[in-house]
Image: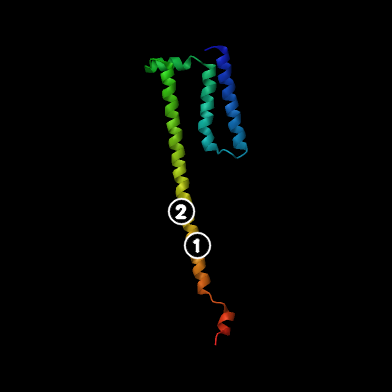
């Protein structure tokens, strides 16, 4: 790997890490979600320092090409990230449904109480 590509990877890793830290500080990104992206940034940093690492690992595992190994790892990580987001989305949807049902029940109870209470002045006016 030539020096320009290594510097590009290193710069990309540092910029990515700084970007996520800024988003966390501005409360636009929660820490649990940023952990996976921070790990990705760390992986880019590690690969920029040790460019032969992917070739070494892929050959040890038995891949014919390091590119195939990279594709497999990236696809696997994206599937894990997608599954994590799906679980979070399901949890939030369930919480929204529960909250909507709770609010509807509270509003119904409030309406029933208002209907049950009659204005004392109206009772006095009736003959």
Q: Which residue is mark 2?
A: 98
Badge count: 2
- Look at 44% across and 41% down and name the residue there: 87
Residue 82 against residue 74 in the figure, above or below = below
Residue 39 against residue 52 in the figure, above or below = below
- Look at 59% across and 24% down and name the residue there: 14
Distance from label 1 to label 2 (Cα)?
A: 12 Å
Q: Which color scheme does this rendered protein use?
A: rainbow
Q: Quadrant of residue 86?
A: top left
Q: Quadrant of residue 120?
A: bottom right
- Pick the front one: 105 or 52: 105
Residue 70 against residue 28 in the figure, above or below = above
The quarter of the rendered structure image containing the C terminus is bottom right
Q: Disc 2 on helix, strand or loop? A: helix
Position of 57 with respect to 24 (left or right) is left
Q: Disc 1 on helix, strand or loop? A: helix
Q: Position of residue 118 (x, y in %)?
A: 54, 76
Q: Which residue is mark 1?
A: 106
Which numbered disc, 1 or 2, marks the residue that appears first in the sequence?
Answer: 2
Label 1 crowd bin: few (<14), some (14–19), many (20+), radius 10 Å? few
Q: Position of residue 50 (x, y in %)?
A: 52, 16
């Amino acid at each position: 790997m030539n020096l320009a590509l290594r510097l590009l990877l290193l710069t990309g890793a540092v910029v990515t890490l700084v970007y996520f830290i800024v988003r966390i500080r501005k409360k636009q990104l929660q820490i649990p979600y940023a952990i996976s992206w921070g790990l990705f940034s760390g992986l880019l940093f590690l690969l920029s320092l040790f460019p032969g690492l992917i070739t070494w690992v892929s050959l040890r595992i038995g891949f014919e090409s390091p590119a195939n190994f990279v594709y497999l790892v990236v696809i696997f990580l994206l599937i894990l990230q997608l599954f994590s987001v799906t679980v979070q989305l399901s949890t939030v949807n369930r919480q929204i449904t529960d909250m909507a049902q709770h609010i509807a029940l509270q509003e119904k109870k409030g309406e029933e109480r208002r209907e049950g209470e009659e204005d004392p002045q109206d009772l006095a006016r009736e003959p």
